[in-house]
Structures are given as structure tokens and as C-alpha cells.
Image (tube, rainbow, N blue to C red):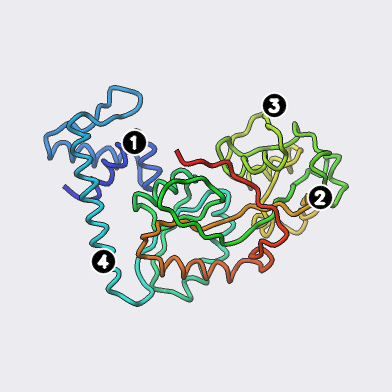
Amino acid sequence: MTLKQLEYAVALGDLGSYGRVAKFMGVSQPAVSLQIQALEEELDIKLFDRSRKQVEPTTNGILFLQKAQSLLTESKHLEDFAFQLSEEVQGDLCLGIIPTLSPFLVPLFVDELNKRYPKINLRIVEAITEDILRGVKSGMFHGGIISTPIESKSNIEIQPIFYERFFLYVSDKHSLYKFDKVEIEKMDYNDVWMLKEGNCFMDQVTNICAIELQQKGSLIYESNNIDALRRIVEYKGGITFVPELATLTIPADQEDLLKEIEGKERVREVSLINLKSEVRRNLLDSVLETIKSCIPKQMLNKENKEVVKTNFVEK
């Protein structure tokens, strides 16, 4: 019996799906299945009922998982105690970052972080807000970088890092292409390409527009990838929304497709979240400091900006 097997089992009891556990823990689905099967064979106990669509713990499984969770918690406390004995900025750090931010933020700061703190072993996992919050609470992640504000009853500390504006990306075939700034009210919302439902960025876009956007037509493209939506606009036409960091990687010959939104600057607040009891806070502070040094200075200031709500409520 290993701690990793216990982690897989506890995660399966929480998530109810081998696929979700594999995605959440960054491993293959067969690896999860084999480890849990090996655990059940060693214990000679059936921990999970697999006869239903959602995997559920058996009666004995519920009791075992409660003890397993206690053991994992004590293991983390022991690891944290050992970590506190060292005063040097070093050690392992696992961060969850939302998909609409990670591709644009990570390349900005990872090299600088490695130069400043070469003894920080940073692991970054792309995950949606719900899974990042779950991972922070379970100890899977030491911290997370998400869009805020959020509603949470957990013992979570939220520290804003920067504020990035929303821009429009408009096809050169669209009637709004000729404008440098676009009034939201003049948009035809049937022309807008959206991210996959349930994404905080999509929720913020609908809040900006103050309507319920619905996908129509013969092509429906579900994605959590902002660059993919940009390509759709370039080749299919229409409009999409992009956050400010994403604009930094747009080629010079396509910058004319970027349009500012008329009126007060609307921004998404990007924050670091972690447990208030997180002992690796010094490592998180080092990452936070490095990110701020690499972000365009105007994005660090909240003054005269309207933070768009996310609609995220912890379940």
C-alpha cells in the first residue's frame, strides 16, 4: 500500500470518475485504474461499486477512505513540518492555472523565476477553477491562479495579482472592422464566437454584454482555447473576446483585428489563491513577486477599472 494509491482512491471517491481523477492528477486513466485495483487486491476489500455510471464507494469503501484521508492529511503535515525546517527558498511547488490564462502567463515568468530561484521545483497544471479550488483544499495544489472574484466558504486566501483588459478580435470581413473602438451595444451577438460553457472567461464576457449569448448556425465549436477562437475568426469571420495578455502574442500583421471596447476599462481580476495555513507561502510569494515583475506595469493597477464578475460559486 502506498500514499499514491491512497491519493488515487480518495480522489476517485470524491470525483466519481477514473477519467476525472486522471485529468485532475495529471496521469493516464489506466494508471489510476491499475493502482486502485492493486490496492483492492492487497486489502482484499471491494472499495468501489463500478456497476453504475458514476463510480461510488461501497460501505466498506467509505470507512476506508475516511481513514485514508486522515493518513494523507497527517502525511502532508509531516512534509510541511520538514519544509519549515529549511529557511532557503527551495522545494517543490505545484500550481493550478486556468486554461484561458496559462498559455499567455506562464511563458512570461518561468525563465525569470528559474533565474531568481533555481531551487524551486515548479509544477504547473492547467485546470478549471472548480478543480483548482478542490486541489488547493485537498493539498494537491499548493496554490492556484484563477480569475476572481469568487464566492467561497472555504478557508482560502485570495490575493489579486493583476488586472487585464478585455479586447475584441474582429474579422476583417466584419462591418465593425473599420472601427478602432467598438461600442458593445453595436455588436450583433450572433457573430460572437464563445468559449465552452462553464468557463469563467465566458461568464465574464456574457456579463460585459449583459445578455445570454447562444450559439447558433451550422457550426458549433466548443473550446477552452482562446487562440483557437482567434483562428476561427480569421478564417470563418465574426468576433471573439480576448484578454490582454493574449494580445501580446498576436503577430504584427494581425494587430489591426484587435479592437478596444468603448467606455470604462473592463478587466478580469487575476488572483493567487491558497489555504491560509499553506506553509509554502514563501515559495508562493516568490512566484507572485516574479509574476508582477514580468507583467506590463499598467496591468498591476486597479484604479479606474471595472472588475467584471465571474459568477463562480463554490459548490
Comparing marks 4 and 3, which lies closer to the viewer? 4
Q: Secondary structure at mark 1?
A: helix
| Mark 2 and mark 4: Cα distance apart in space | 52 Å
| Mark 1 and mark 4: Cα distance apart in space | 32 Å
Question: Residue at horizontal 62%, vertical 41%?
Answer: 202
- Determine whether, in the image, residue 142 is placed left or right of residue 185: left
Please say if the residues under marks 1 and 3 sit with CB atoms less than 8 Å apart.
no
Question: Residue at horizontal 31%, vertical 22%?
Answer: 52
Residue in the foreground of this view, choosing between 89 and 224: 89
- Tell me the number on the disc at residue 81: 4
Amino acid bearing label 1: Tyr
Mark 4 or mark 2, which is nearer the start of the sequence?
Answer: 4
Q: On the image, numbered disc 3 is attached to which residue?
A: 216
| Mark 4 and mark 3: Cα distance apart in space | 55 Å
Amino acid bearing label 3: Lys
Residue in the foreground of this view, choosing between 7 and 60: 60
